[in-house]
Image: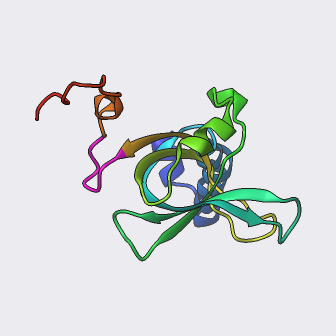
Amino acid sequence: SARRFWHLPLFHKLAAAVASLGFVFLPLAFVVPRPHEVQITDRNSFSHADGPLRYLIHAVDLSDPSKTREYENEYAFYLGKLNPQGLKASLREGHFYRLWVVGIRWNYLPTMYPNIISAVEIDKDGSEIEAARFAPVPSGEEPAGQ
């Protein structure tokens, strides 16, 4: 099939490439989560410019601080996300996170935003923060390692 594809006219090759993009790779962007390492700047924004009211989360990309990102926080039953409000409550402004997102940012009608599936708190270098650092210390004892 590769040999047959090589001998097709240019228009047929372009049509095959566009069809592959539209029917295979674009739907995968809504099913396969990918990581974004960001710093949350605002988790209570609203958008209602082109339709229903949406709650947005604004962030700054850690690899390029001049790049801002916007996310939605919606249900995603097919990926096991059942509690979007719990996820939003766990995000804190000014903290760094590795967000696992699906979807794409589309600026044209209809406007679309990536959906956050899960979030893991990280430090500025991208290393995950251990859960033990947040464990409460019993009264009268000093934390381990001090």
Q: Is residue 135 left or right of residue 92?
A: left
Q: Residue at x 74, y 64 (%)?
A: 46
Q: Position of residue 52 (x, y in %)?
A: 88, 59
Q: Is residue 117 left or right of residue 74?
A: left
Q: Residue furthest front?
A: 140
Q: Nearer the viewer, residue 130 or 34?
A: 130
Quarter of the image with the C terminus is: top left
Magenta highlight range: 122-128
- What colour-coding does the image apply? rainbow
Is 105 covered by the magenta stretch?
no
Q: Position of residue 143 (x, y in %)?
A: 20, 30
Is 123 covered by the magenta stretch?
yes
Q: Residue at x 64, y 31 (%)?
A: 81
Q: Position of residue 37 (x, y in %)?
A: 40, 54
Task: Work out whether 95 lies above or below 4.
Answer: below
Q: Is residue 141 left or right of residue 84?
A: left
Q: Position of residue 39 (x, y in %)?
A: 43, 59
